[in-house]
Image (cartoon, rainbow, N blue to C red):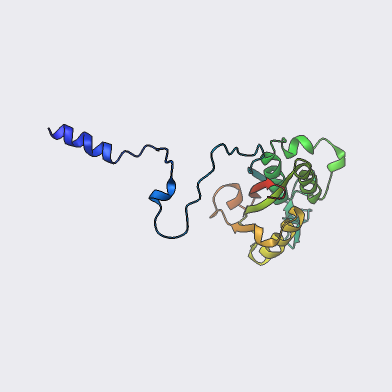
Amino acid sequence: MEQLHATRALNRFDSRPTLVENPSEFAPPGPPVLARPRGLHYSDRMTRIGFGYDSHRLVEGRDLIIGGVRIEHELGLSGHSDGDAVLHAVTDALLGALAAGDIGQLFPDTDDRWKDADSSVFVAKAMGIATEAGYSVANCDVVIIAESPRLGPHREAIQRRIADLLGVEPGRVGVKAKSNERMGFVGRGEGIAAMAAVLLTAAGE
């Protein structure tokens, strides 16, 4: 008998989805519930998300460029181009969202055209691919991991520069600077790392 009662109780609270013909019957007081019309199909266009990561060593004799902003520091980032790990991560996030390869495939370090190149060129080319495919940037989020220099005073300049490259207002670009609490290569001051996420939506949506 106890097992029978338990079974009935489970049946009462069955959480499996049930087709509701008239959602308004179950709607709470307030604005009406909008039900999706029968036969509605989603567009073959979709929202796309990409993630990028890059890191570079800090070395002598190089300018320090982070997020397209030149920062006064005794060391700069090594690299075939200008070594801007932030813009490289943003570029890879764009390409990843489009399933269009990565920065190493499109701009290999074996190609002298990209020797000491301004990394904004890479972002611009990735944006060109996105635009041609019919997508625009909804928002971008960036994390910069560096023990030194402190990037707080430069955050807004980096935010504005990335927004300009992506064709959006600064309010759509998040920039966060973190230390690595003296752990790993970043914590030892050997390099700087960056991560970026980009959300693309079909242009006009």
Q: Nearer the viewer, residue 173 or 71?
A: 173
Q: Residue at the far right: name it.
A: 113
| Quadrant of the frame with the N terminus | top left
Q: Position of residue 165 (x, y in %)?
A: 76, 54
Q: Quadrant of residue 112?
A: top right
Q: Position of residue 167 (x, y in %)?
A: 75, 55
Residue 6 lies, with reference to residue 57, above or below; the image says above
Position of 67 with respect to 174 (left or right) is: right
Q: Position of residue 177 (x, y in %)?
A: 61, 58
Residue 88 lies, with reference to residue 1, above or below; the image says below
Q: Quadrant of residue 21?
A: top left
Position of 93 with respect to 106 (left or right) is: left
Position of 40 with respect to 93 (left or right) is: left
Identify the residue at image location x=78%, y=37%: 106
Q: Residue 117: in sight, yes or no?
A: yes
Position of 72 with respect to 21 (left or right) is: right
Identify the residue at image location x=76%, y=34%: 105
How many marks can you see?
0
Q: Nearer the viewer, residue 1 or 60?
A: 1
Q: Residue at the far left: name it.
A: 1
Q: Residue 56: in sight, yes or no?
A: no
Q: Nearer the viewer, residue 148 or 1?
A: 1
Q: Position of residue 192 (x, y in %)?
A: 65, 51
